[in-house]
Image: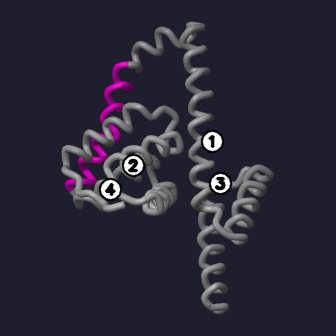
Amino acid sequence: MKKREASIWQLYLTFLKIGGLTFGGGYAMLPMLQREVIDIHHWVTEEEVLDIYAIGQCSPGIIAVNTATMIGYRKRGIPGAIAATLGEVTPSLVIITMLATILLQVQDNQWVQRAFGGIRVAVCALITQSVITLSKKSLIDLPTVLLYLATVSLTLAFSLSPLVVVPFAILYGLAVQRIKRRKA
């Protein structure tokens, strides 16, 4: 796949679309992010998106915004980062501003509660799809499978914070790479 250049306007509109159609946070944005920036625009590869997404998760702030900012920066530098970030946050700012007053008035309405229940189920499905997609590219050998199983088990058993899990995973990855280099 040959990577394409991106205009500031394309970055803004693409992330406006992603931000406006993604419900449920950063994990739920992965399928749309893949479709838009990999399949349609060919701005980055799937491996690059996984790396960018991982960095976005480890960085302070909102995963979706961090990811948009990094992709925008890779394509067009600081102006691209600003355009992608603004595109990602514009829908939320507009929608939250409009809904804040309305939601307070209708929050006890059964139709509203049912709608949010449906949205939660859809978000779970999108996150599951993202996990499956990520696992196909990330669980590539025995050490990565072991790290995955340990992380899931320890997180479920002890409700570990990402502040514990991520540094552990970094150290584990560095140790595994060092061992692989010694064997080579």
What's the CA distance linking mark 2 and mark 4?
A: 9 Å
Where residue 135 sits in the image (x, y, percent)?
62, 55
Residue at image mark 3 = 161
Q: Residues within 10 Å of mark 3 (few under 14, many from 20)?
A: few
Which is closer to the viewer, label 1 or label 3? 1
Q: Left or right of 8: which side holds 56?
A: right
Where residue 66 sits in the image (x, y, percent)?
40, 52
For the residues bearing labels 3 and 4, Cβ distance under 8 angstroms? no
Q: Which numbered disc covers residue 128?
A: 1
Under mark 1, the amino acid is Thr
Q: Residues within 10 Å of mark 2 (few under 14, many from 20)?
A: some
> Is residue 112 shown above or below 94?
above
Of labels 3 and 4, earlier in sequence is 4
Where residue 167 sits in the image (x, y, percent)?
60, 67
What's the CA distance linking mark 1 and mark 3?
A: 20 Å
Residue at image mark 4 = 43
Residue appearing at x 23%, y 61% in the figure: 77
What's the CA distance linking mark 2 and mark 3?
A: 33 Å
For the residues bearing labels 1 and 3, Cβ distance under 8 angstroms? no
The local secondary structure at tag 1 comes to: helix
Q: Left or right of 124: which side holds 14?
A: left
